[in-house]
Every structure is written in structure tokens, then in C-alpha cells.
Image: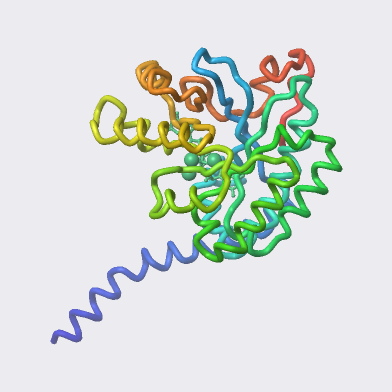
Amino acid sequence: RAKKEERGSIRFFEPEMDRQLREKRVMLHDLDLVLENKQLELHFQPQADPDGTPFGFEALVRWRHPEKGLVPPGVFVPLAEETGAIVAIDEWILRKACQEAASWPKPLSIAINVSPMSFQHNDLPGLIHSILLETGLNPKRLEIEITEGVLVQDFSRACSILRRIKNLGVRVAMDDFGTGYSSLSYLQSFPFDKIKIDQAFVAQINKNVQSSAIIRAIISLGEALNLGVIAEGVETELQRDFLADAGCFEMQGYLIGRPQPIAAYAGIVGRPPETSKTAMVG
Ligand code: C2E
Ligand code: MG
Ligand code: MG
Ligand code: MG
């Protein structure tokens, strides 16, 4: 009798699990063709001083799927990491974002996210070096954003890769700072240029005493270690003012601007409006 019930409950979940698995298989297959089909798009989100003056952008990828519309990286990057497709995708993004930044009349900075898997399976310092040569982008304008995931797998190898990237004159930022397990010890062992305060802390400013205290602590840490500090996910003037008072002078978030095709920011990059229709597609 128990067996029968068990079997029954398994049958109950089967169709939903089947559907999810099938959908995932289709997505994984579509992802393999994403570059060939020119379905990736880069959006750019401004990074600014507390007074709102932009000094650079972060490149954020989106997947223009024929049926699903604009798929966010939170959905497809983990899938692309499963298949390894992320390595080619990261390479495409690096090249595309550097080409784009090199074409701006104003020498603004460009921050680009790189997945841990690209560290394992690509010669990133070599790749970045050739892209800098290809595009003529000044290395000082380029910043590579990594998360703790890069350092977790093979720490000494990751450090030597990061050092080689820094030796090109490129900056390295630690993304989502404060959300991982051992961010502090990583800061001690690797000379990052900048830390990005995770948006989870910013969202809690003036709602949660602990978050405000953690933000102040991260900013002091940045000062003590001579690191730049940027806050992500700044959505309100109250958050901006708290951060500026606490000594954080770089901000990114919807308050300053949403991630959008670069055409939306033609004025900021110094382009006349009529050439601003060149969207970053394909
Ligand atoms: P991230 O690098 O920490 O990027 C910040 C995320 O916060 C972005 O989400 C951005 O759109 C969102 N955001 C920015 N300002 C605000 C705000 O004021 N409020 C709120 N609620 N959210 C804000 P997005 O674009 O969905 O990207 C998610 C993550 O996907 C990124 O987190 C990054 O880890 C990854 N990712 C994005 N682009 C790339 C890429 O080109 N390559 C790789 N490997 N990963 C990428
Ligand atoms: Mg980032
Ligand atoms: Mg982040
Ligand atoms: Mg993130």
C-alpha cells in the first residue's frame, strides 16, 4: 500500500519536472547557438560621482530570445556556465564592450564582468592584451569585475592570472562585496583596485541598522587598504546621501541610470544625437 502511494506521488510530480527539464534542454541548445544567431545584446549602466556626473559604465549582457524576449543574465549565465558556453560568451562581451568604449569621444571607463569559468578555460590575460591592441582602448579605462567564485577554485592560479591582468594596466574590482564567505582574507592576499558594495546592503540603508554599519565598515576598510569603493543598486536620494556622508564617492543604480543600449546615453559618451542610433546588437 505504501509503495502504491509513493508511486502515485512520483507520478504527480512527473509532468512538471518533465516540462522543466525539457525547457532547460531547449534553453541549453539555444544557448549554444546564441553567438552564431547574434542574440546577445550589451546594455550599459552609468557609474557616477555623488553629484550624478558619470565617469564610466558597466557592461551588462542580455539575451534577446526569439520567444522568451529579453532574458536576464541571472537566468542564462548559470546555464551557460553548466555547458561551458560562458567562455565564448565572455570573450564576445569583452571584445564588444571594449570596441564600444574605444569608439566613445569621451575617455570614460568601462567595467566588464567575467565568470569564474573563463579564468579556468581561457587565457584571459592574453585575450585582454589582444583586445586592447585590436581596439586601441587605453588599458587605464578598462576594469574587470570578478566575484569570489574566481578565487575559490584554485586560489594561487587565480591570483597569478589577476596579477598578469593588472600588469597590462587594467584594474580589477571585486563585485558583490560582502556577500561571500571570505572576502576579507581575499582582500589581504590580492591587490584589488576597487570593491563594489553589494546592492543587498544598499537596499537596507535606513531600514536595518546592521546594513548601515556594514556599509560604513566596508568604506573604512577601503580607505585603510587604499581601495576604491563603489556602491551598487543605489535607487533613492536617501541612499545616495547616506553613502556620500559615509565617504563612498562612486555610485551605480537606477537613481543614476538603468542599464540601457548605449544609444540612450549618447550625450554622456559625447556623441551627437544623430549617430546615436547605432545599437549594440549582434
Ligand atoms: P552584477 O555585476 O552585480 O550587476 C549588477 C546587477 O544589478 C545588474 O543586474 C543590474 O542591472 C542590477 N542593478 C543595477 N542597478 C540597480 C538598482 O538600482 N536596483 C536594482 N534592484 N538592481 C540594479 P543584471 O544586469 O540582471 O545582471 C545580473 C548579474 O549577471 C550581474 O551582477 C553579473 O554577475 C552577471 N552578468 C551581467 N553581465 C555579465 C557579463 O557580461 N558576463 C558575465 N559573466 N556575467 C554577467
Ligand atoms: Mg558587476
Ligand atoms: Mg554586483
Ligand atoms: Mg551580482
Number of numbered labels in the structure image: 0
In this rendered view, identify the residue nearer to me: 37 or 59: 59
Residue at screen point 64% across, 60% down:
85
Residue 213 at x, y = what percent?
A: 29, 32
Residue 118 at x, y = what percent?
A: 64, 58
Q: Is residue 227 above or below residue 246?
A: below
Residue at screen point 74% across, 24% down:
107
Residue 19 at x, y = what percent?
A: 43, 63
Q: Which of the image's four quarters has the C terminus?
A: top right
Residue 59 falls left or right of residue 207: right
Picture quadrant where residue 142 is located:
top right
Q: Is residue 223 above or below residue 169?
A: above
Residue at screen point 70% across, 60% down:
122
Residue 146 at x, y = what percent?
A: 56, 48
Q: Residue furthest front?
A: 224
In this rendered view, identify the residue nearer to me: 67 or 65: 65
